[in-house]
Amino acid sequence: MTDSLIPLALAARLRAYAPYSNYFVGAAIATDAGVFSGCNVENASYGLCNCAERTAVFSAIAAGARTVMAVVVATRNGGSPCGACRQVLAEFADPSCPVACVDETGTLVLETTVGALLPHAFTPRNLAH
Ligand SMILES: O=c1ccn([C@H]2C[C@H](O)[C@@H](CO)O2)c(=O)[nH]1
Ligand SMILES: [Zn+2]
């Protein structure tokens, strides 16, 4: 499920705007509205930096998607999504949704799920009465 997303995540990583951290990140996701990708976008006002995963998810949602079915994140060393991105993924993905973290060569470093990355997530269900 994640294999075909790897080249897309690697390509998105090359488009990262990361002049401050020099940590280039790409993400590719499969959704109910197709495949989307994103990169991290930094800012001279550091706190405004947006991660690759959230760029991809927000692009997908803006295009009409509502469900994330698979995620690939590409970094130089296979780093996994930050806490904010885990929370955003949990909003739109089932806990069983696969997440693959690959390094800059596309080699798999971590194969996990949204549920394993953020157990006991706060989700829309918590707001239902
Ligand atoms: O999973 C992650 C972790 C970090 N970053 C970005 C944020 C910042 O631009 C840079 C260093 O933290 O990497 C991502 O895009 N995704
Ligand atoms: Zn993040």
Image: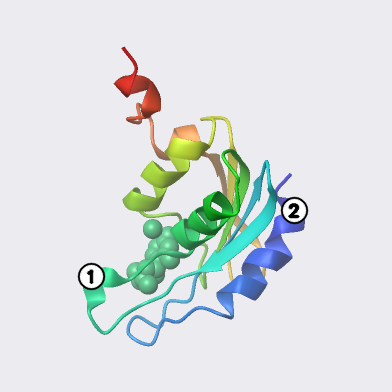
Screen quadrant of the C terminus: top left
Give the residue pinned by disc 2.
3
3 or 57: nearer the viewer: 57
| Label 1 environment density (alpha carbons within 10 Å; few <14, some 14–19, many ≥20) | few
Looking at the image, which residue is at 38% across and 21% down?
A: 125
State yes or no: Cβ of the residue under disc 1 lies below 8 Å from any atom of ligand 1: no
Estimate the x, y position of residue 32 in percent, counting from the top left.
68, 41
Question: Which amino acid lies under the numbered mark 1 shown in the image of this protein?
Answer: Gly
Could you tell me which quadrant the N terminus lies in?
A: top right
For residue 120, which numbered disc appears in the image?
Answer: none
What mark, if any, has residue 47 been given in the picture? 1
Residue 49, how many percent across, how many down?
32, 71
Q: Is residue 4 above or below residue 18?
A: above
Identify the residue at image location x=34%, y=80%. Answer: 21
Image coordinates of residue 82 in percent, x first then y, are 37, 54
Secondary structure category for the residue under label 2:
helix
Left or right of 15 on screen, residue 22: left
* Res 56 visible: yes
How many numbered marks have been drawn onto this rendered protein structure?
Answer: 2
Secondary structure type for disc 1: helix
In the visual, does 115 lie left or right of 11? left
In the depicted view, which residue is nearer to us: 59 or 105? 59
From this viewpoint, is residue 26 visible? no
The amino acid type, in three-letter code, at marker 2 is: Asp
Mark 2 to mark 1 CA distance (whole Å): 32 Å
